[in-house]
Amino acid sequence: MDRSSRQPDRQPDDAFAGEAEEEPSPRAARALWWGSAALVLAVLGTSVLVAGAEHVGRLPAAVALVLVQVGALRWVARAPAAVLAATAAAGLAVWALLPAVTLTGALLAAQVALCVLSAIRPRRESARALAAMCLPAPLSFAAGGPAGLAVYLLTVILAWTAGQWRRAQRARTRSETRRAVVEERARIAREVHDVVAHTLSVMVVQAGAADDVFTRQPEQARQALRAIESGARSALGELRLLLRAFGPEAAEEGSGELRQPGPSLARLDALADTVRATGMTVHVDRDGTTDGLPAAVDLAAYRIVQEALTNTLRHASGADEVRVRVAAEGECVTVTVVDNGRTPQGRSGTQGTGRGLLGMRERARLVGGSLRTGPLPGGGFEVAARLPVERVS
């Protein structure tokens, strides 16, 4: 099984571990191939045809070597080092056949491979590749003098530097994403802790009440015990969700901050009123009853609606109306928030890495649910969450 087939099975935290090699997606790899192939054909292919006009006998071999380089670039995202070696050898052969083609132009495909290798492989490996690409520098000096040497070294170093810039940009994005996820997880952990602590506090009170009336009012004691049983089931459900969602690193959160239990869908109208106060028209539709939901699911649904409304106020250009729909459908709750704004470029993708979207996705994942976001064909932006209702038996 190759690395691309294993990648989807990685846990979210694994994606941030270390400075592992990162291959482009299949779509990006295809785009890279088509772009680099077009560049090599346009620049090197044209140079070979022009230079080969004076050496007709060598022209077919030179064209074949150009096509070999173009074909090798098909695998540049998977094996950039091998492609670099192949294209460098073919490029040197082209230059040997047609000296009128500059060495810089003949090694254009190799420079593309060096850029990709610099972007997706460890720096030590890319530095060795850069040193190897500098080895033909004396040939460029012999053919073009100091100017030829300077141009060759400049293009090789620029190719390597461009790859390093892309690598640093990707590492910075991973770091920011990791920080946002860790912060959101810590906040969610505190909220779920508050919910569980509240449930246990109620159980303690009920146990004390049952003990007080156990002999004089046994029926009231039974009611208290039933309430304790219900509370215990709810607390077990919250602990189950928490332990499933977080690894050992969640234990490092120990601020000891005392907070009130988080809001729920029962306060959705109050939340909508705060948004209406800004002049936004908010429609709230309910389908089915949300009473008796597990506290973590109730809180996650509320926070997703809250964040979606906040995003509408902050990012939905021209939006003056938003519709919120909460539906309890069997063993799941669906939450949909749709606005009528014009979607800016920053919100056009469904895989955004803004903290708002990350927070909503993390909340949905915590309770075993899923989140879908994206622009609508007729305009506006949609946030749709599906949260399963797991009951502890």
Image: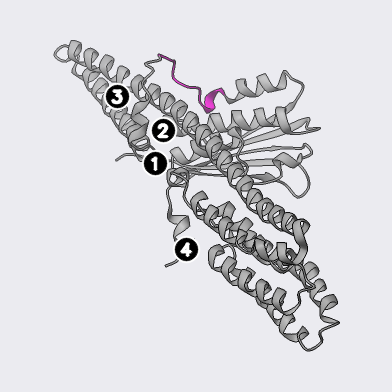
Residue 220 picture location, percent across and down = 24, 17
**Residues at badges 2 and 1 in contact (C-beta under 8 Å)?**
yes
Q: Which residue matches tag 2?
A: 294
N-terminal of the pair, mark 2 or mark 1, is 2
Relative horizontal placement of residue 301, taking residue 60 as reference (left or right): left
In this view, which residue lies farthest toward the left?
215
| Disc with the residue nearer the chain's start (1 vs 3) | 3
From the image, state whether disc 1 or disc 4 is nearer to you.
4
| First along the sequence among labels 3 and 2 | 3
Q: Nearer the viewer, mark 3 or mark 4?
A: 4
Between 15 and 343, the one lying in front of the other is: 15
Residue, far bottom: 57
Query: What's the magenta region?
Result: 258-267
Q: Is residue 84 visible?
A: yes
Identify whether 94 is placed above or below 390: below
The quadrant in which residue 201 appears is: top left
For mark 4, what is the residue? 5
How many residues crowd mark 2 within 10 Å: few (<14), some (14–19), many (20+)?
Answer: many
Query: Is the C-beta separation of discs 3 and 4 under 8 Å?
Result: no
Nearer mark to the viewer, of 3 and 2? 2
Of the 4 image quadrants, the one containing the C terminus is top left
> What residue is shown with label 3?
227
* Residue at mark 1: 390
